[in-house]
Amino acid sequence: PTPAPTPAPAAMPEPAAATASGDALPPASLTGRILREIWWNLAGATVSDLADDPRFATAPDAIDYLPRLDSSSLGKDYGVRIRGYLHPPVDGDYRFWIASDDSSELWLSTDEDAHNKRYLAGVTGWTPHLGWDQTGGQASAPIALEAGRRYYIEILHKQADQKDSLSVAWQIPGQDRAVIDGLYLAPLVEP
């Protein structure tokens, strides 16, 4: 069954604090989740089938929030865009991975501006849920990130039929690879 659409997210209040570099960060109460937009009844299995559909430029059919970058069991013939802000906990080089059924793309900005996003990794066919090392393009090169800054992150996912899933992991410097938890995410808020 297709879930009923939910209203668009409310505007974010002014940030409560700024980092030493002057970058504004959202209050801690606004972290812990990320925005997911869903378009139902989309044919095809590639991200371009989502991006080229005229409905993609309009409001999604449904909006919700994920507590971490891991999603499954929505059904078939849908497209998803997940977007918001990533908050690295420490300075250093991070690696990212994406796994999905069917295709997906992972984008990250050099800062909090979506216009500066760049492609990091993707899946052109499908992988098992949490299948990080199935194809060559699923992993990013190391990316230098700074603690106390926020970075715009966007994931596009197109599901055709049968099983569906989407997951994004990272490796925080000095730690093991793990799905990105909501602790390090904040939802996108339109101006």
Image (spheres, rainbow, N blue to C red):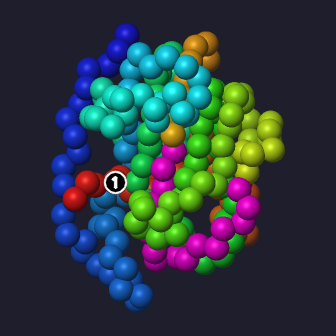
Q: Residue at x 47, y 70 (%)?
A: 111
Q: Residue at x 66, y 43 (%)?
A: 122
Disc 1 target residue: 188
Per the rendered image, the range of residues in magenta is 140-155
Q: Residue at x 31, y 58 (%)?
A: 30
Q: Is residue 32 magenta?
A: no
- Judge left or right: residue 78 versus residue 136: left
The percent coordinates of residue 47 (x first, y second) are: 55, 33
Q: In which quadrant of the rendered view does residue 120 lie? A: bottom right
The percent coordinates of residue 85 (x first, y second) are: 42, 59
Q: Amino acid at mark 1?
A: Leu
Q: Residue at x 42, y 88 (%)?
A: 21
The crowding category of the residue bearing disc 1, from other C-alpha atoms within 10 Å (few below 14, some 14 to 19, many at least 20), is many
Instruction: Determine whether the residue tagged by mark 1 lies in a helix, strand or loop.
Output: loop
Q: In this orientation, which residue lies closer to the viewer: 52 or 4?
A: 52
Q: The N terminus is located in which quarter?
A: top left
Q: In which quadrant of the rendered view does residue 42 lie? A: top left
- Judge left or right: residue 157 versus residue 80: right
The percent coordinates of residue 91 (x first, y second) are: 60, 78
- Judge left or right: residue 163 versus residue 79: right
- Judge left or right: residue 18 versus residue 48: left
| Residue 95 makes an appearance in the image | yes
Q: In which quadrant of the rendered view does residue 123 lie? A: top right
Q: In this orientation, which residue lies closer to the viewer: 175 or 102?
A: 102
Q: Is residue 142 magenta?
A: yes
Determine whether 128 is above or below 29 in the image. above
Q: The C terminus is located in which quarter?
A: bottom left
